[in-house]
Amino acid sequence: MTQKVAFIGLGVMGYPMAGHLHQQGYDVCVFNRTTSKAQQWCEQYAGRMAVTPAEAALNADIVFVCVGNDDDVRDVVLGEQGALQAMSAESILVDHSTVSADVARELYAICKKQQIGFLDAPVSGGQAGAENGQLTVMVGGDSADFVRAEPVINSFARCCKLLGGSGSGQLAKMMNQICIAGVVQGLAEALHFGQSAGMDCAAVIEVISQGAAQSWQMQNRYQTMLNGEYEHGFAVDWMRKDLNIALQEARNNGSSLPLTALVDQFYAEVQKLGGNRWDTSSLLTRFK
């Protein structure tokens, strides 16, 4: 029998992720707060839509959530018309949002009381990764729930790994964003330095990208950075949201993140330049 799944949140990530589930043969029902987006998805994939998260989750074996922040997750999961109002025992809730580890642990405990599985499973790979079904998924939760959900998650993932108990997925995503922040700042400084020195930066990148300096950011962002093109990719606003989650968690666990805190302030400067929706590689604009 075809597994029934619900997908709540059809943003730049969720829309194609739900599409991959449909293309893999799952019976998908979607919900999005902007109804027109859900209607568009249904027209494209000949799928089903619901008018509330609860309606989408009714009779679903697995409910996926991919929304913006802690409050958004609580709203679509715990609200009066939230998914948990309709989910049945033994079903699984998988949250692909990037939120705090506290919310993940909170939802895990609530789901446990209702005999519902919960996995915090933030993703990395950006819009292109979602569209190509090549996301990296970092998961926290119980192994039994992971074993059941992993084959379904693999519809849009190239790597999916259980990293520990509840909250571990979100903590791993914080580590991911910490790494990205430092790499992007380093690339921006290198390009700024090269331009100031009169170097052919594209030629230099062609060489150094073959050595130890190589990174995804270098391979995929150097040319758009040199062209001053930033109307794409992962928005500065969302990156600052993620970095502030990491900085708050660092305060809780006693770790020191001086570089992350500095780059977060650099992103605040980009926002003042009007770059709220620019790609995170827009750190280079600070030097112009």
Image: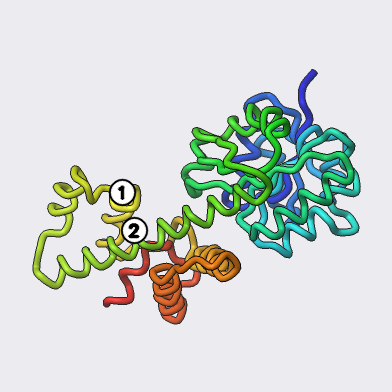
* Residue 66 percent coordinates (x, y): 66, 50
Q: Nearer the viewer, residue 188 or 13?
A: 188
Q: Residue furthest bottom?
A: 272
Residue under the image location 73 percent in, 57 percent down: 73
Q: Position of residue 183 (x, y in %)?
A: 34, 58
Where 85 sits versus 103, above or below?
Answer: above
The kind of secondary structure element at disc 1 is: loop
- Res. 190 image quadrant: bottom left
Label 1 environment density (alpha carbons within 10 Å; few <14, some 14–19, many ≥20) = some
Cα separation, mark 1 vs mark 2, equals 8 Å
| Residue that mark 2 sits on | 183
Rendered view: 151 above or below 256? above
The residue carrying mark 1 is 215
Mark 1 belongs to which amino acid?
Answer: Ser
Left or right, 104 with respect to 163, comes to right
| In contact (CB < 8 Å): disc 1 and disc 2 | yes
Q: Is residue 241 visible?
A: no
